[in-house]
Amino acid sequence: MIRFECDYNEGAHERILQRLMETNMEQTSGYGTDAHCERARTLIRQACGNEEADVHFLVGGTQTNTTVIASILRPHQGVIAAVSGHIAVHETGAIEATGHKVLTVPSPDGKITAAQVKAVYDAHVQESSPEHSVQPGMVYISQPTENGTMYSKAELEAIYEVSRACGLPFFIDGARLGYALASTECDMTLADVARLCDVFYIGGTKIGALMGEAVVILNDALKRDFRYIIKQKGGLLAKGRLLGIQFETLFEDGLYLEISKHAVDMAVKIHDTLEQHGVQFLYSSPTNQQFPILPDSLLEQLSNQYTFTFWEKVDASRSAVRFCTSWATRVENVDALTNDIIRLLHEKQTQDEIAANRIEVLV
Amino acid sequence: MIRFECDYNEGAHERILQRLMETNMEQTSGYGTDAHCERARTLIRQACGNEEADVHFLVGGTQTNTTVIASILRPHQGVIAAVSGHIAVHETGAIEATGHKVLTVPSPDGKITAAQVKAVYDAHVQESSPEHSVQPGMVYISQPTENGTMYSKAELEAIYEVSRACGLPFFIDGARLGYALASTECDMTLADVARLCDVFYIGGTKIGALMGEAVVILNDALKRDFRYIIKQKGGLLAKGRLLGIQFETLFEDGLYLEISKHAVDMAVKIHDTLEQHGVQFLYSSPTNQQFPILPDSLLEQLSNQYTFTFWEKVDASRSAVRFCTSWATRVENVDALTNDIIRLLHEKQTQDEIAANRIEVLV
Amino acid sequence: MIRFECDYNEGAHERILQRLMETNMEQTSGYGTDAHCERARTLIRQACGNEEADVHFLVGGTQTNTTVIASILRPHQGVIAAVSGHIAVHETGAIEATGHKVLTVPSPDGKITAAQVKAVYDAHVQESSPEHSVQPGMVYISQPTENGTMYSKAELEAIYEVSRACGLPFFIDGARLGYALASTECDMTLADVARLCDVFYIGGTKIGALMGEAVVILNDALKRDFRYIIKQKGGLLAKGRLLGIQFETLFEDGLYLEISKHAVDMAVKIHDTLEQHGVQFLYSSPTNQQFPILPDSLLEQLSNQYTFTFWEKVDASRSAVRFCTSWATRVENVDALTNDIIRLLHEKQTQDEIAANRIEVLV
Amino acid sequence: MIRFECDYNEGAHERILQRLMETNMEQTSGYGTDAHCERARTLIRQACGNEEADVHFLVGGTQTNTTVIASILRPHQGVIAAVSGHIAVHETGAIEATGHKVLTVPSPDGKITAAQVKAVYDAHVQESSPEHSVQPGMVYISQPTENGTMYSKAELEAIYEVSRACGLPFFIDGARLGYALASTECDMTLADVARLCDVFYIGGTKIGALMGEAVVILNDALKRDFRYIIKQKGGLLAKGRLLGIQFETLFEDGLYLEISKHAVDMAVKIHDTLEQHGVQFLYSSPTNQQFPILPDSLLEQLSNQYTFTFWEKVDASRSAVRFCTSWATRVENVDALTNDIIRLLHEKQTQDEIAANRIEVLV
């Protein structure tokens, strides 16, 4: 079985494992106070072009989203997000479990707009008794989105500007941030991201690390006591060095973007190959997730050899599915996948034609 | 600097790292549904002598305590624990953050008794309006305790019996469980632990793993939907295989107890050596944490070369400190530590005698 | 100013005030343990045709919804409700504040269907990894709804049947229950309501009482320790007798339905009078809330003498507004309101015709 | 049965009921936006000598404590309180239910000291890893305390000064505030209270009102969005006027202090009468709660005619009990109570002497 159903099917990049081996018997202090974490923080601050940023390392995405959001909101506030946002649908109510409503806005492709943020804010303050409903308290997006789509720099600037005008901290979930930054269609750098929000995180779990997410807090007002919240939410790893060593490796000579680029290249290869053979896509994704629309009959055959994610029915006979690539995806697996799809499409076409002819003959 | 301030100063046991290397490019499904996790679950069930147990892997101790407790209690219930229990003092209110009070009982040495559990329960049900106070909903202990002390089998049996009689699920925090089981004073096996509570966990972070805790649920009534709670609390590791591989390694041929025994041996060595030189101890600990009482002046000197934890002032000139050993502790470091302490004690004694003589002379 | 913007503009029915005066210096025990509460419970059980029901008195609607829902759900569960449900939009996230997501379903008129409940449940259990999303844990509706609409007995039966089949407790918010039961279109009794759900409440605040809601728990599994949850959520009134006395008065000789009927009669009068003059309505409401669609220009004039609630823009020149009647609404005020609306409509029509003619002339 | 077990055994002061009757059919807007609430706010601000104070009306004590505390603390913070504080023991974990730990300090008589607050604060900031434990976030006391004792002005000043120095908002629970202010031993006015804390509340439920507590927020930083929190916690009464009318009545010409004084007079009468007959008291209370120590045998007889609260066993044959007086306590009931106690004490003494003599004779 060849796996494309997610971007965390393998362990870690070999250089990370190598570094873990080399440092294994070093004795360090716990909870992220060691020299590896300190160096990783410095490297990330440099990459972000912000020497004042606070950098914290957590273990996973849901944990990170919960911790960041709980640290920002007062009890009566909620977080604005796309209806398809990870916090809205894939975290078993982790945000609600800390007492906060996710204020969802419609989104055809995973992205939200500055105008939507403004509209939610305006609608609330214009209520006759606003205290009867949840107050918008911050804005959440992911870059790239759950649908592989990507915000442009201008779009981020617009959301950030509106958010600031409304007094809403702007938080970017970067679980797959590298896969956006490495996209050929991307018009921003990590430093741009760091300039265009109040807090964001750089995902490691899906990009080369065993696990780990690096939260970068830009807004001074959000920095206070963040470690308390991490600890309370169960995210303060005893052997914090493990996260430090991994991010040190990812950020010391460009490994993070280098392996991100590989994933995107593999995704583009899938996309372009299939598109050349007439396959349509549900979303226009320039990142590591691709959502081709394929005949249901083909999917059954394909699933004997490949794993992928069913996304949604598109019409009576076709569905969109998701293929993820990652830093670990092998080109030979991509070739096998696309070849098999194309072959199955041809076979199906031939059968359909035969069937159509038979029907003609019968008629 | 030689470190004794905690039992998570190093990375992981080399066999674990080796196994992570070997399996690194295997493609597996996520969130603990892979074959390594499955095998680790089987090995743990066997070690527990309970084929029906549910086994789940989480990342850290605070996360595990929060998840287990939140999964059991109804909103108006609290958890009975020692006043010095980890959940009562070292988790930044993680239990309260899920809505529950920690109902503390006094404890001179970290342990609580069946009689205390019964007393809390009885006091509550005998209140004239019990609904005005938090209802005891479960019992929490750690084995060994935060003070290195250990419950006997008879003590566990008594607590479990009272807990069942009162309808209170009994949860054992085993963050350092191996260090109890490997103690020469221990009169129970892992299977005994599994027979004497409703749910417990086997700590990996402090015993050989990079990170990881294995929750073992014995009571059927507590099994339902536990994965939802893990996910909501941020504990469902995407690359769950990392935990499976580690526990597989720890439990496939006795590694867990073997390395636990090393830690205890090292601790006993510290204890016996110091005791032979007249050092007193704050707690009578047969496990990997030792709490000698030392002159404050000596501690300052000692801290130039060793890390350890200040525990509490004992009198005007002496304090108790904590030294932890672990699976990774080197015997030469233990020897260096005890030799240095003994040397410093002698030097101090000599100085004290000289000072005393001077005073005599002056008088 | 004559008020129609809500159904809690006055104090209490005079018989309630009278009874409060008569009993004022009686000495009773606190927190609802007094004889008045006991008698009120008995009367409500009788009216519900269920001697085994648990009856509890709380102060307000949001408090009651929060308390009931928090008492039922486990941490990973949410409550299914209409997107316009009171708990979804008018309670400042009170449900989320207890850790639970409101799982909203679309609703054009405030009602949801058994099919929608089934669909939410099925969609969840059919997910490949259901533990990544909130588990539906109960069903919430209000009877009548926020839009004045009403479920038929057959509709309630269908929802209750599906809910039981899915293991979802079914909760009916009856903040305005009397105004449904007293409607001429209503095909159910209070005993029917009590037979067709697991728990519901009978609203007093909006129907004759100073304040107060009576929760009726039918399902034995939901009865345990409910008073603890009331107390924790701040709803256990010290002078619980105040609620007992009020519900005693409302239920001892049919007062509750009698005054509810008056409110509905007044609402029907508004509806029929306006409809006869060509006014359209946003919802088809047979209860005490009416939602006529009126010209925006008229609303401004009307608001000089009457209060009402702006509901939504319907088109460029018209909006729907809400008029509420209650047990306290005076027929002369209803007549004044409808007369003024009709007069203003005529004046506007005349002006419009003149304007139209002018335009014709100009043309 | 004559009741002394609490201070909420009757309805409301007759002038309050009278005013509710007079205003009953007035039409007002909801949720505390009416003219009665506005006037009550003005009267309270005047009585507090602070024109800038925010005043909000809630229904009950637990609700008020929960709402105030939840509005102030960030997730990782707890509230310092006496171990016997109402929030620590009598609210079913309401504070924990909003995510916060109650950080209790020992107290022999219900009071805490500035030095204790300082010590908790210092101990926390001096921890080596403070983020592993709950951060003190505010200070809670009640004036008078649960034990009837009272803070002096100097004591309040000291706590407030320390609290400000530590950045901890200082909150005074005034559920029985009048009973402190009306005490002959009280050296402060309502304006002093308002000057010596950040937020407090004036209890109505126990002092003349049907129900109701008036929160007074002095510190500007705590004022923002408080109504949202009230609503979310279920405390925003639809017919808010009920609270406004009651506090208007209590504060328009000194009624609050006048009836408080009556309660204290009655309590002092109980105290002085019993003390003259040799009765000892558990606490030295100058307010409306008295805690005499009486023979257990006597208590049984007394309970046939009077209700009171068992407090604690004092020795093998005696217990402390609590008698509460209130605005509604009748002097003839106080006389009956004290006469009966004195008679029973004499009877017991006589019997004891006879028994002693018998034993002498027998010897």
Image (cartoon, coloured by chain):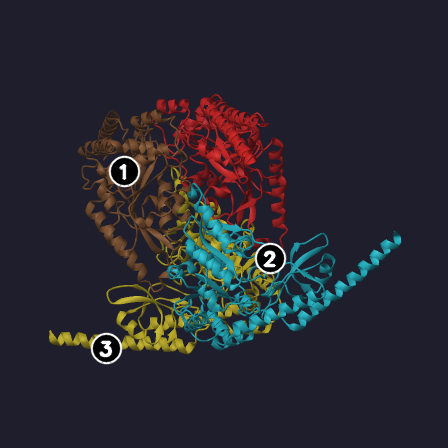
Chain colours: A red, B brown, C cyan, D yellow
**Callout 2 secondary element:** loop
Give the mark toward the camera: 1 or 2: 1
- Name the quadrant of the N terminus of chain B: top left
Q: How many marks?
A: 3
Camera-side residue of D21 and A94:
A94
Three-letter code for the amino acid on which mark 3 is drawn: Thr
Residue C217 horizontal/vertical position (percent): 42, 63
Question: Picture quarter containing residue B86?
Answer: top left
Q: Residue at x 29, y 36 (%)?
A: B322
Residue A27: horizontal and vertical position, in percent? 34, 27
- Write down the quadrant of residue B16 in the picture: top left
| Label 3 SS | helix
Name the residue carrying label 1: B44
Residue corresponding to mark 2: D51
**CA distance for labels 3 and 2:** 62 Å
> Mark 1: which amino acid?
Ile
Q: Residue A54, percent across and down? A: 49, 33
